[in-house]
Image (cartoon, helix red, strand yellow):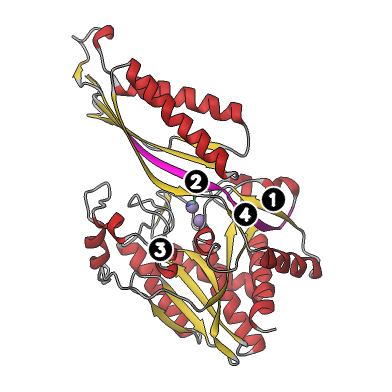
Amino acid sequence: MELLKNKVEETSKKITQYGYQEGAGMTRLLYTEEWLAAQNTFLDLFEKNGLQAYSDDVGNVYGRLEGREYPDQVIMSGSHIDTVVNGGNLDGQFGIEAAFIALQYLKDKHGSPKRTLEVVSLAEEEGSRFPYVFWGSKNIVGIADNEAVKGLTDNKGVNFVDAMRECGFDFATDRTVRKDIKAFIELHIEQGKVLETEGKQLGVVTSIAGQRRYNITLKGEANHAGTTPMGYRKDTVYAFSKICSQSIDKAKAEGDPLVLTFGKVVPKPNTVNVVPGETLFSMDCRHTDKDKLISFSNQMVEDMKQICAEMEIEIDVDLWMDEEPIPMDPTLVDLIDTTFEAKGANYRRMHSGAGHDSQIFAPRIPTGMIFIPSVAGISHNPAEHTDISDLTVGVEALINVLYELAYK
Ligand code: HGY
Ligand code: MN
Ligand code: MN
């Protein structure tokens, strides 16, 4: 365990430096300089540690340990290299580090596997720079929407394709779709507090909640803050505040596991003495039940249209992400469970409220996820933390599961 603990600390230091800012946490967005530096560092680490290192057409990075009996059967493990703005250095990043450390350990201890093992550093999952999610994993399974990304710009007006080309990736659309992946295993921090509250060290993920994300624009009328009587205003921040308050109250009334978040609110012109004529805001709605997710989010949209009609404010609703709840592969869930049982691990089965690349792989490739605890359940925050002992137990758990899949 000491060896694994040192490897975790050593690898984390090498990657965290790209995108980390003292007091502001991690910001490593798709196709930025720090994103490219982190991907190149993983390529170099994989190369230097006996793996065949390569990247694909969109910048996913792989380290391959060829199988001696079934080289065309790939057991893949990894996660995403991108982060949210001002997030932590474990969400995504640790799943790649853990897979890399696991492959090194397995190679050193058991030699070549029967089936090929690959660690993957997925290009993008969060949707933090451009309003498109799972760009890395969707390209691997061939469902990326090229038309959807072509016109996208980030909040500085940089175009998606230009950003991609700046990192050396052409926007070719005939990309290779992987058909050789026989299982995908993702180790990830829980980003909630179930494991910590119950004193468990590991989670066996059974399903991933569905999520719908919207960009909503309210158009009222910009006007003078001093000369416009309250009764004559078309104030979009006021309209947003009504929408937000009513929606959150309804979400609370609906109860767990439904969650509703208005994470981004941008009034225009965002000036102290101007009645805000326009407000752009986001809505993120999630549920483990597909029908409830659809009915609740549709109702929220109807409610906001009603509020806007009463206030004579225009509303435009763009549903740009719509992922239904996804079960993990039952055989893999059982395999992970029995492996943990056999090792006397302190674990429980649970669903994931957070989205993950595993939900893109799962309908197409047998997929399983392993959780480790998040201190105080905090994530998407510079305070995101997991104790080194839990990180190390997570790597060990991943080693045991990958051994079952690739060496037996
Ligand atoms: O938002 C999520 O659930 C994930 O962190 N992308
Ligand atoms: Mn995240
Ligand atoms: Mn993540």
Amino acid carrying label 1: it is: Leu
Q: Does 84 appear in magenta?
A: no
How much space separates mark 1 and mark 2, taking CA atoms?
Answer: 22 Å
Q: Which mark is residue 211?
A: 2
Q: Quadrant of residue 106?
A: bottom right
Label 4 sits on residue: 207
Question: Which span of residues is magenta-colored?
Answer: 200-216
Q: Residues within 10 Å of mark 4 (few under 14, many from 20)?
A: many
Q: Residues within 10 Å of mark 3 (few under 14, many from 20)?
A: few
Q: Quadrant of residue 334?
A: bottom right
Which of pointers 3 and 2 lies earlier in the amino acid sequence?
3
| Viewer-side residue, 149 vs 117 | 149
> Measured from the top left, where is residue 309 in percent x and y?
33, 19
How much space separates mark 4 and mark 1, taking CA atoms?
Answer: 16 Å
Does ligand 1 reach within 8 Å of label 2's beta carbon? Answer: yes
How much space separates mark 4 and mark 2, taking CA atoms?
Answer: 13 Å
Which of pointers 3 and 1 lies earlier in the amino acid sequence?
3
Residue found 60% across the figure and 44% down from its top = 289
Instruction: Describe residue 140's horizontal placement relative to residue 69 as left or right.
Output: left
Label 1 sits on residue: 195
**Secondary structure under badge 4?**
strand
> Measured from the top left, where is residue 350 in percent x and y?
68, 52
How much space separates mark 3 and mark 2, taking CA atoms?
Answer: 18 Å
